[in-house]
Image: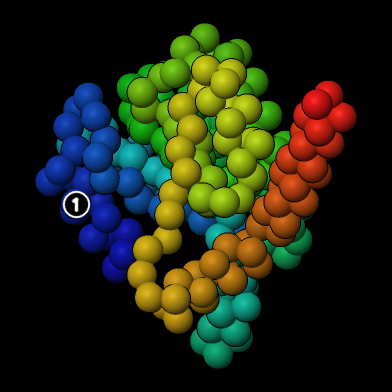
Amino acid sequence: NAIETLALAAIQRHNTPERAYVYNTVQTYLKSAHDRISRAVQHADATGIRTGIKFVRGAYISYERRHAVMKGQSSPVFDSIHDTHKCFDSSAAMSIELVGRGKLSTLLATHNEGSVVNACRKIVSEGLPREHPEIMFAQLFGMSENLTFTLSNSGFRAAKYVPFGPLLSVMPYLTRRLEENRDMLKGGRADAQKVASELKRRLNFV
């Protein structure tokens, strides 16, 4: 599509064989996710430029399905969240292997604890250093803090990303993120419970 074409053009212009500065986004609720990874690798092979991919689950399910119906086409998204989870995890594993072969840089943007654990295990099993400069995890600022800090304290590279802009512009984005991955809500409750438990422990100690 047009966005992917623009992203690949920017990748070719700004990335180097050693480092990726521009990342394309692959939404793993799309059935075409693995095909997009393959195209990115083909582009890297053809140009000698390292490509970057950010993996998310995706948050435009209603739009994608409605658009497909209007066009008389089959839905491009998976029928179940279980299939989306499987696609994210397999895409993450594939990307980690490609990092090891020097083909790719990857950013795994997820609040799903199971996906994070699977990716960490894959990094270790591939014999890659936990702090590999071309592998990073990311969560929204203010969400899944415990997950981010656990990753960092375990030696993996983890970042918080911050939506920036006027409130009315940012809220639809945040709403889509909640729709995309409701595990963020569970993570928020878990964080709150851990903070409350720690406060209680300290107060009792005093």
Q: Residue at the bottom extreme?
A: 70
- At 45% from the left and 38% from the top, the residue drawn is 159
* SS type, badge 1: helix
On screen, residue 55 above or below 67? above
Identify the residue at image location x=37%, y=63%: 164
Q: Is residue 190 visible?
A: no
Q: Is residue 148 left or right of residue 186?
A: left
Q: Position of residue 123 (x, y in %)?
A: 55, 20
Q: Position of residue 102 (x, y in %)?
A: 33, 22
The residue that disc 1 covers is: 10
Residue 134 place in picture, x, y as percent: 37, 27
70 left or right of 47?
right
Along the horizontal axis of the image, is 2 left or right of 152?
Answer: left
Residue toward you, 47 or 123? 123
Question: Residue 154: x percent and y percent?
Answer: 59, 18
Q: Is residue 128 above or below residue 196?
A: above
What amino acid type is highlighted by mark number 1?
Ala
The residue lying furthest to the top in this view is 127
What's the residue at 72%, 56% (across, down)? 185
Quarter-of-image position of residue 45: top left
Q: Which residue is rendered at x = 61% and y = 50% of the image? A: 143
Question: Camera-side residue: 76 or 170?
Answer: 170
Q: Residues within 10 Å of mark 1 (few under 14, many from 20)?
A: some
Is the residue 177 above or below the residue 66 in the image? above
Image quarter hosting the C terminus: top right
Residue 131 is drawn in which quadrant?
A: top left
Q: Quadrant of the N terminus?
A: bottom left
Q: Is residue 172 visible?
A: yes
Q: Nearer the viewer, residue 38 or 127?
A: 127
